[in-house]
Image (cartoon, helix red, strand yellow):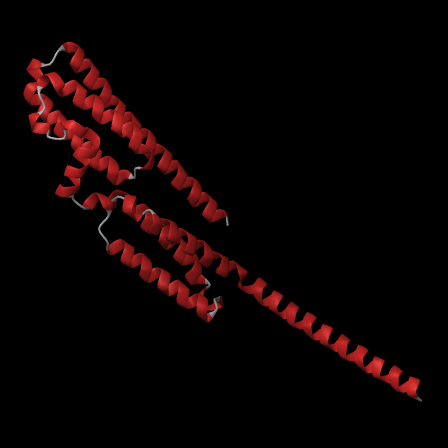
Amino acid sequence: MHIWRILKLAVVLFLCLQLSVSAQESESNTISYSERQEAPVEQDLRQLKDWVRLQSDKISTTTRAEWPAIKSEFARHASKIESGFHNLSDNSKREFLELKTRFEEMESKPLYDEIPLQAEEVKLREKELLGGFSNIQNIKPTHMRDAYITFMQNVRVKRQNWIPRDWDYADYVLQKLGNRKATVESQLTTLDEIKIRTLIGEFHALRSGQEFKENQKAKNKAKSTGKN
């Protein structure tokens, strides 16, 4: 009798275990089916979140001329999600509306090329890039070439970590150097002129090269985000 009781108990436990496993599998299948149903629009939402984060990260380097294309891209992403909005979870619906609000806030902010250069920052950049020649209006004709050499030596060292705004300040300092050069041009030698023009050309080549690299990085990152 004792053995039969043990056998009955084992059978009951086995049946309970089977029912539990079946229930878990049924629940898992239900969740998987639900996830498959929501995946397309939820994936679109994740892509939009990544895209908005990217635009937010580079807003300090975005120009007003670039904004129409950015706005059009947002509209394209948003349209896909709006068409399947009813399939989003309540939490995802809130996230989507928050993303739209966040993008509108980004659009209302002045972009980097709309913000004037700050006088105090200009002074700091003059000292940083020109060293002992930072008092530009007092540079003597005999030191004009050396001022440009000093400027470019510092640009070469510092440019690796620059964003477009840094280049704007450097360009402004270069323009001020150019204004001073124009007032003493008649006293410069031919060799000084050639050297200065070479250095100015190098500055613009370095800036164009870095802008090209940044644009390529942005495009590659956007493509990568779009594929995920």
Front residue of 19/227: it is 19
Q: Position of residue 23 (x, y in %)?
A: 69, 75
Identify the image quadrant of the N terminus: bottom right
Q: Is residue 1 left or right of residue 227?
A: right
Q: Nearer the viewer, residue 113 or 35?
A: 113
Image quadrant of residue 2? bottom right
Q: Name the side, left or right, on which 153 lies relative to 213.
A: left
| Whether residue 61 is situated above or below residue 186 in the rendered picture | below
The image shows residue 186, relative to residue 132, as above or below, that is above
Judge from the rendering whether residue 4 lies leftward or rightward of residue 59; answer left or right: right
**Image label count:** 0
Q: Is residue 213 above or below residue 195?
A: below
Residue at the bottom extreme, as displayed:
1
Q: Is residue 129 visible?
A: yes
Can you tell which quarter of the image residue 131 is in? top left
Q: At 29% from the left edge and 39% from the top edge, which residue is drawn?
A: 163
How far across and how far down the image is residue 169, in percent?
20, 36
Picture residue at 22% right of the left edge, 36% below the top:
168
* Residue at the extreme top: 190
39 displayed left or right of 168:
right
Placement of 98 over or under 67, stated as above or below: below
Residue 62 can be seen in this image: no
Residue found 41% across the figure and 62% down from its top: 82
Q: Give residue 194's quadrant in the image.
A: top left
Q: Position of residue 212 (x, y in %)?
A: 35, 33
For the point 26% across and 28% down, the residue is 154
